């Protein structure tokens, strides 16, 4: 299965070998800003500069705003260079209050044909991701779902 990874530029800078593995495995990538900024707490100019910093490392026309936050002005400023991609299902695998089983149930119950499902590849999400993702993929495949990149 191939996926689209929205990458934080600073993580690409710190872990270029992981970035290379993602590309070599045939996955697609997208920009997720350099420092995972919150649009509501960052000036317009600083936010755009941060996206451009990520672009120096992650060549892609896809952008996912961190925290799902984007202003109309930012979306307008980015629209010529990026396709802004949100999601239809957030598995909440980043939430330490959830058990791995709860995360799996969220993913299974919320997925519909055409869903864009978000899992996170962070240390914070690791326990829930390692449990839920393989089970999710198996059950969805067993139900006849196919997966593709954006």
Image (spheres, rainbow, N blue to C red):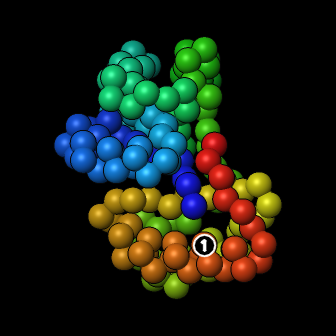
Considering only vertical position in the picture, is 38 above or below 49? below
The C terminus lies in quadrant: top right
Q: Position of residue 34 (x, y in %)?
A: 33, 33
Along the viewing direction, whichever of 27 and 92 lies nearer the viewer: 27
The N terminus lies in quadrant: bottom right
Badge 1, how many Cα within 10 Å: few under 14, some, many 20+?
A: some
Residue 74 shows in this picture: yes
Q: Residue at x 44, y 38 (%)?
A: 32
Q: Secondary structure at mark 1?
A: helix
Along the viewing direction, whichever of 38 and 114 lies nearer the viewer: 114
Considering only vertical position in the picture, is 26 above or below 89? above
Q: Residue at x 29, y 40 (%)?
A: 12
Which quadrant holds residue 80? top right
Q: Position of residue 121 (x, y in %)?
A: 39, 59
Q: Residue at x 19, y 43 (%)?
A: 14
Which quadrant holds residue 105? bottom right
| Left or right side of 41 for 133 | right
Q: Residue at x 48, y 40 (%)?
A: 29
Residue 65 shows in this picture: no
- Marker count (numbered): 1
Along the viewing direction, whichever of 91 and 39 lies nearer the viewer: 91
Q: Report which residue position mark 1 lands on.
A: 137
Q: Position of residue 87 (x, y in %)?
A: 63, 50
Q: Position of residue 18 (x, y in %)?
A: 29, 50
């Amino acid at each position: 299965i191939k996926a689209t990874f929205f990458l934080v530029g600073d993580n690409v800078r710190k872990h270029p070998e992981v970035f290379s593995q993602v590309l070599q495995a045939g996955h697609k990538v997208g920009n997720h800003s350099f420092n995972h900024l919150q649009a509501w707490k960052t000036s317009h100019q600083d936010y755009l500069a941060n996206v451009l910093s990520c672009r120096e490392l992650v060549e892609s026309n896809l952008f996912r705003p961190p925290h799902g936050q984007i202003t109309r002005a930012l979306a307008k400023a980015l629209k010529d260079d990026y396709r802004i991609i949100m999601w239809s299902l957030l598995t909440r695998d980043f939430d330490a209050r959830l058990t791995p089983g709860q995360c799996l149930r969220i993913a299974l119950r919320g997925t519909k044909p055409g869903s864009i499902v978000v899992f996170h590849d962070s240390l914070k999400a690791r326990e829930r991701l390692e449990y839920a993702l393989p089970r999710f993929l198996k059950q969805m495949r067993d139900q006849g779902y196919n997966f593709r990149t954006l």
